[in-house]
Amino acid sequence: MHAPAPVGESAALLESLVERIDVGVFAVDRAGTLVLWNRFMAVHSGKSRADTLGKNLFALFPELPRRWLEKKLESVFVLGNNAFTLWELRPYLFRFPHHRPITGGLEAMRQNVTFMPLRTSGGEVTLVCGTVFDYTDTAMAQDRLHDAIAALSREKEAQGQLIIKLEAAQNQLLQSEKMASIGQLAAGIAHEINNPVGFVNSNLQTLKKYCQQMLGLIAAYQPAEARIDNPAMLAEISRIKQALDIEFLQEDLPALIKESEDGLFRIKKIVEDLKDFSHVNESDWQYADLNAGLDSTLNVVWNEVKYKATVDKNYGQLPAVECLAAQLNQVFMNLIINAVQAIDESRGMGTIALSTGHQDAWVWVEVKDSGQGMSEEVQKRIFEPFFTTKPVGKGTGLGMSVSYNIVQKHHGRIDLDSLPGAGTRFRIWLPVSQRAAAP
Ligand SMILES: Nc1ncnc2c1ncn2[C@@H]1O[C@H](COP(=O)(O)OP(=O)(O)OP(=O)(O)O)[C@@H](O)[C@H]1O
Ligand SMILES: [Mg+2]
């Protein structure tokens, strides 16, 4: 066991500790007069004990937040409790230059300061002691940490963007791969269907002619019946006519042929779509007037449109556009037919607005309808080949995928704007010249 140090010696030890400790220690009386000032304070402030003791704290250090600090000190004198200031809230009280090289924009020592009441043996608080802790290193580390976190989150953000772009690119790749393989399939099917459709069509035309001739012959025989005086023969003819229901047959035969022709026309149209879809018929590039193309297309489909919608035209002045005009017309047709089909007749006439415009090196063609609109789901799938929401026989689901391909070929794009119940707007953007647009 150590013997306790004599009183005078322990006071000297304590004083030496306060003097040498690497923490600022000072004390003031109630009037703000300094009564203690250790070496740390002297070194960092550049003011010695002789410069400070007996002097007013605020007079010596005008940078101190006087009103705030006076209140703080007063509360320690009155309440007798410790009080603090933290560097994170108030970077410093004394403006001490930091004694290590200053980096990271810190120009002054960051400080935590604690104020403690010092009591007389009677318990009265006569002095307040302040301890100043140097937190500059922590602050610098924290600043660096903040910078690193910010850089990391910027990087993360950039990575997120990159992932989105990658996903989009992958989707596009998948889409175009799908398109390419379906294109090959479609070209094959179109070719296979084209031949039988060709001879069925040709035979049907002949059949139609023969039927007309036979019906003509029957019609010619009709008046001759009256001249037949063989009752058995007459009875036989009448029996056959009745069994055949010859009147109905004469009426139905042309109708059947007409229906078959319509059916064949539809098959031909599908084959054409399939061929376009698979780029089989690459016709020549030319400079064309898209307003005129839109008009002629509207004429072609006018029969479908006129009972269901009024058409508002709002054409801008367009330069001649380098394009595959026939194919663009097909795009316009698909859009107009889709617009018509989206309109519910039972709610009266709808409207279809056709507009065009010109902006810098681009022109646009817009088809807007007052139809039923599309859900998000439908909008996502609309360019997929064979995607249709229409009943069997009405839609093949090729219109938009064909259109998409044609617009792609022109280095253009299709904007789509649609809300269920609020109609749909397609806007096709096309470069005026292909040379400017080709990548
Ligand atoms: N203007 C529109 N308003 C509402 N829905 C539309 C519109 N245009 C296209 N759609 C939706 O997109 C689907 C695909 O259209 P797309 O033109 O490719 O095929 P389709 O019209 O169904 O058949 P096809 O054009 O081959 O006869 C349609 O079935 C329909 O659901
Ligand atoms: Mg369509």
Image (cartoon, rainbow, N blue to C red):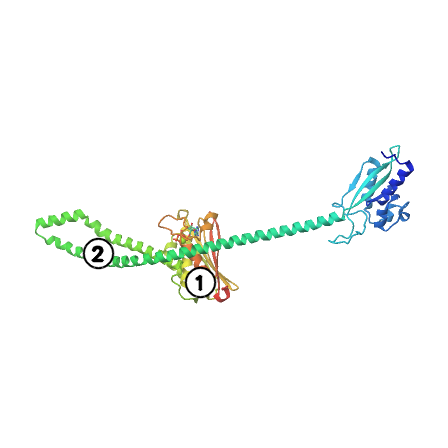
Residue identifier under label 1: 291
Q: Nearer the viewer, residue 56 or 288?
A: 56
Ligand 1 has an atom within 8 Å of the beta carbon of the residue at disc 2: no
Q: Is residue 433 at all visible to an observer of this figure?
A: no
Q: Quadrant of the N terminus?
A: top right
Ligand 1 has an atom within 8 Å of the beta carbon of the residue at disc 1: no
Q: Quadrant of residue 212?
A: bottom left
Query: Callout 1 environment at 10 Å: few (<14), some (14 to 19), or many (20+)?
Result: many
Residue 289 locus on image (x, y percent): 44, 65
The numbered dot on residue 211 is: 2
Q: Nearer the viewer, residue 420 or 49?
A: 49
Which comes sooner in the sequence, label 1 or label 2?
2
Q: Residue at x 69, y 49 (%)?
A: 145
Query: Callout 2 environment at 10 Å: few (<14), some (14 to 19), or many (20+)?
Result: some
Q: Residue at x 20, y 55 (%)?
A: 215
Q: Amino acid at mark 1?
A: Asn
Residue 248 locus on image (x, y percent): 22, 49
Residue 106 locus on image (x, y percent): 75, 52
| Secondary-structure class at tag 1 | helix
Image: 122 above or below 347 = above
| Secondary-structure class at tag 2 | helix
Q: Amino acid at mark 2?
A: Cys
Query: From mark 1 to mark 2, how far is it between C-alphas?
Result: 44 Å
The numbered dot on residue 342 is: none
Q: Residue furthest front?
A: 1
